[in-house]
Image (cartoon, grey):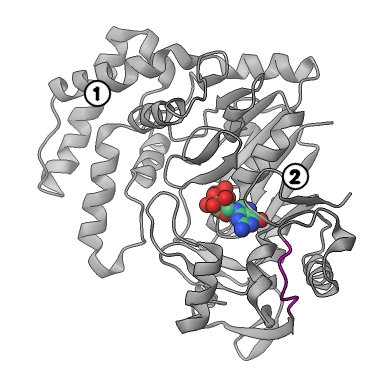
Amino acid sequence: MSNCAIVGVNWGDEGKGRMVDLLTEGYDIVVRFQGGGNAGHTVENDMGKFALHLLPSGIFRSGVMNILGNGVALDPENLMKEVEDVRSKGVSITPDNLMISDRASLLLPWHRDMDELEEIRLKDKKYGSTKQGIAPFYSDKHQKKTVLAGELFYPEKFRAHLRDLMEWKNLTLQSVYGHEPYTMEQLEQWIADCCEKIKPFVGDTGAYLKEAGESGKQILFEAQLGSLRDLDYGIYPYTTSSNTMAAYAPVGSGYPAAKIDSTIGVCKAYSTCVGEGPFVCEMSGEEAERLREAGNEYGAKTGRPRRVGPIDLVASKYGVEVQAATEVALTKLDVLSYMDEIPVCTGYIVDGKQTDRFPFPLALDDAQPVIEYVKGWKEDISGIREFDSLPEEAQEYVKMIEKAIGCPITYVSVGPERESIIIRK
Ligand code: GDP
């Protein structure tokens, strides 16, 4: 056993939550190191079906410490709603199994407004924001215009800092967007309703992780979204505003000296993408509708229908590379069981030439997919637990992907439940 990162290889929604839920058994600590409540992990286990947005997926396992690291967009309001929701289904959440980094920046009430106002200003040029305030939050964090969770322990300084930030932000809200200014009364309400509730969970997670790491505890780093949404390596500007890479996990977790021994890249057996941006292998019409229905591809946070397509070997290979994945978990293979023939995107045509290299983001606009078809298996595989018991065609499909992406596929998921997994090691 060793430290491990579980990350997305595609555009997000690969099923990372179900993999973390499965693997937390062997780990002492699960850490979320980036992102906010703008996407969702869906986890199904013996306690029910949960849509997690900010909580680490280890929250269902007793004895596991869950940490929200300094790299996350810590939204006190949404976090406490989520905590109450998960608690209402019988899951215990206390400072004994959830810790928030004192160095995590707080997503402030105006970040959501800024997101909404900017999307309105952009009209049809919008990026498809989930309007959770994530982009304004990260830009303010990098301008050093947010407050840290640990400031809650210094009430006077915290309020003075917040007042300065409010006065600064009101200039933009009023003069640029013609929006109402914020008042300290509103912020006092927010402090009382939301911040005071997160306070018992806030602590020095960096020290906790360092001690845990040095005493041989096993840490699982859990990412949100996927390679193609990474701020630096994704389809900019249709990315998220944080780094979704395993390489960022030590920095965003609060334990920069952490060594990641294995990185599991989660890759879906077909492609999905939420929101705007280039999506070379996109399917349309009835074919798309059928796949969307079969895979139940509707956003966990927004309910938006996801765009769908065949597996994209060009994007997935790139996704595996930038994550430096040491192994891959292929999810939702069962969803393809209805197909006579399965389409596969094996290359792109860029500037008249076929390539298997993922191009510069702007070149994606005119890239054409090369689609080939492989034979389907046309039988229910959801009850299968051994790789050799899969129909020949399904085994071939997995091996073909493995070869193209250049990384061993060690898990094949054939259903949403914790036990619907084939382990191939
Ligand atoms: P995440 O954000 O990467 O965790 O992904 P999502 O939670 O948005 O999407 C994964 C969805 O697929 C969830 O509803 C899961 O319950 C479901 N799921 C995960 N793995 C499988 C699988 O192998 N087969 C099927 N049918 N559903 C799966």
Disc nearer the start of the sequence (1/2): 1
Assess mark 1: CB under 8 A from ligand 1? no
> Is residue 297 found left or right of 383 in the rendered image?
left
- Seen in the picture, residue 280 relative to 146 is either above or below; the reply is below
Quadrant in the rendering for residue 228: bottom right
- The residue that label 1 is drawn on is 190
- Start and end of the magenta stretch? 376-381
Q: Residue at x 38, y 43 (%)?
A: 134
Q: Do callouts 1 and 2 mark residues in contact (Cβ within 8 Å)?
A: no
Mark 1, secondary structure of its residue? helix
| Residue 316: % across, % down | 68, 65
Q: Residues within 10 Å of mark 1 (few under 14, many from 20)?
A: some
Q: Nearer the viewer, residue 165 or 105?
A: 105
Residue 379 lies in the magenta stretch: yes
* Disc marking residue 240: none
Secondary structure mostly seen in magenta is: loop
Q: Is residue 332 visible?
A: yes
Q: Nearer the viewer, residue 55 or 323?
A: 55
| Residue 111: % across, % down | 29, 39
Q: Identify the image quadrant of the N terminus.
A: top right
Q: Residue at x 64, y 21 (%)?
A: 62
Quadrant in the rendering for residue 74: top left
| Residue 49: % across, % down | 52, 41
Tag 2: amino acid: Thr
| Residue 303: % across, % down | 38, 56
Tag 1: amino acid: Trp
- The residue that label 2 is drawn on is 263
- Seen in the picture, residue 22 relative to 11 is either above or below; the reply is above
Q: Residue at x 16, y 25 (%)?
A: 186
Q: Residue at x 41, y 49 (%)?
A: 301
